Amino acid sequence: MDPAPLMKLAMQAGMLTYLPVLRKGPANGLWFTPYHNGDRLISNRFGIPEPKRHHRRQVMPWALDAVFVPLVAFDGTGNRLGMGGGYYDRTFAYQRQRKHWKGPKLIGLAHDFQCVDNLPNQPWDIPLDAVITEAQIYTFQKTDD
């Protein structure tokens, strides 16, 4: 699901938007960099376009309000099957330790056919708060472990 129309609406509403940038190092997580319409994007090591990295402009994940998360499949409890790199799970792993404020909301973007009955859940998996499809919005209640 292409997030570009949602980003365009957010920018028109005066909201700040950020794009993920691969973080170098052993943690292999994500930073988030401000994005403005027309900013130059460069391909990362996987060929995915991302903003040119400016260290002083990077935002930590917990400073965001919502993050649109890519996925291959999801189930009715908010479990997500990603692309296998674990970048989003590592980036938002801190949410497992917090009991109250866990920001940001993690929202999957998918097609309805990507909803499956059940996905295996590993201890390191970070569940979604919601998924938006072309047909509906699924919301999930996160449980404390």
Image (cartoon, helix red, strand yellow):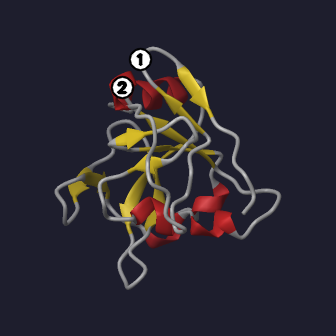
Q: Residues within 10 Å of mark 1 (few under 14, many from 20)?
A: few
- Residue 87, given in percent of the width and then of the height, sits at 40, 64
Q: Amino acid at mark 2?
A: His
> What residue appears at the point 72 percent right and 63 percent down from the top-left corner?
145
> What residue appears at the point 49 percent right and 64 percent down from the top-left corner?
122
Q: Are marks 1 and 2 in contact (CB under 8 Å)?
A: yes
Query: Would you identify the image quadrant in which residue 43 lies?
Result: bottom left
Is residue 111 positioned above or below 102 on the image?
above
Q: Which residue is mark 2?
A: 111
Is residue 51 positioned above or below 13 on the image?
below
- Residue 126, given in percent of the width and then of the height, sits at 55, 58
Query: Would you identify the image quadrant in which residue 94 lies?
Result: bottom right
Is residue 48 positioned above or below 134 on the image?
below
Quick one: 105 or 63, which is closer to the camera? 105
Q: What residue occupies the far top of the structure in this picture?
A: 135
Say which mark, if any, is on residue 144: none
User: Circle 2 — which element?
Assistant: loop
Q: Earlier in the sequence, mark 1 or mark 2?
A: 2
Q: Amino acid at mark 1?
A: Glu
Quick one: 117 or 62, which is closer to the camera? 117
> What residue appears at the point 50 percent right and 23 percent down from the top-left corner?
9
Q: Residues within 10 Å of mark 2 (few under 14, many from 20)?
A: some
